[in-house]
Image (spheres, grey):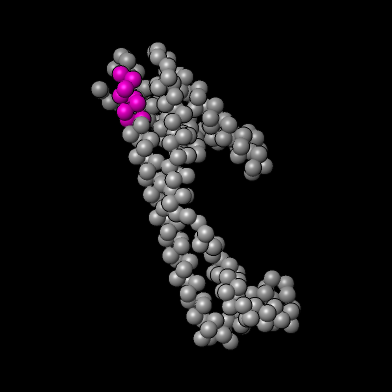
Amino acid sequence: MATRIITTFAVVAGFAGAQANIGASLPIFSVLIFGFANLFADGVSMALGNLLSTRSEQDVYANEKSKEMYEIKHNKEMEWIESVQILITKGFTKPQAEQLISIYSTNPKYWVDFMMNQELKLPNPEKDNPFKMALVTLVSFIFFGFIPLIPYVFFKGSSLFVVSIFTTAVALFSLGVMRWRVSKQSFLRSVGEMLLLGGAAATVAYIVGTLFQI
């Protein structure tokens, strides 16, 4: 979420730098055009990337699952040995492990799921909806990425960049607090890293903006 905000804010900062360089106000629609173009282009790119990534994970999982199912059907003895060894490494005695695998073998589907999780360490993405996840990514990207543009859409004046800095800082601060509550890390670290990341990206964009004559 932070990257969504920072990406758009960097565009705004770049225009602010260019404006400072020429010593005149740039048309607000210029900021909005490039801001929204960047926002939607990045949002669609992230959504499509999420879609392809999820489908790739599902394809890999399905391929490996078919291999495990084949091995259980045609090389049951080897799978038995591997499964018992896995349970032994988890703290079971050999007799306990063999008893469990004997039970698993009566349910090949569960046995396959066990091997996928314990041997291959692959999370099960079968229930994931690639299109739904892509849509969520797109909507969240646009929602959070819109925050730095709020002043340019709803307000007028010569201090819109300052207002954008404020709204962006508040948003990043809020995300930092959320991160702190979830991760239980240091409050200063959680919030500080968010603000530092946003500030660094905006500073670079602002400096680059000052290098161009418009």
186 vs 127: above or below: above
Of residues 132 and 213, the one drawn nearer to the viewer in this rendering? 132
Q: Tell me if I can see residue 202 in this picture.
A: no
The answer to whether one can see residue 198 in this image is yes
For residue 206, which quarter of the picture?
top left
Stretch in magenta: 27-35
Q: Nearer the viewer, residue 207 or 51?
A: 51
Residue 139, horizontal then vertical, whole percent:
45, 40
The location of residue 175, given as percent across then percent down, is 57, 35
| Residue 130 position within the rendered picture, expressed as x and y whole percent measured from the top left | 45, 54
Residue 208 lies in the magenta stretch: no
What residue appears at the point 64 percent right and 42 percent down from the top-left corner? 182
Main SS of the magenta part reads helix
- The answer to whether residue 73 is above or below residue 119 is below
Residue 32 left/right relative to 63 = left
Q: Where residue 146 sits: x, y (%)?
A: 44, 31
For residue 86, above or below residue 208: below
Q: Residue at x 43, y 36 (%)?
A: 142
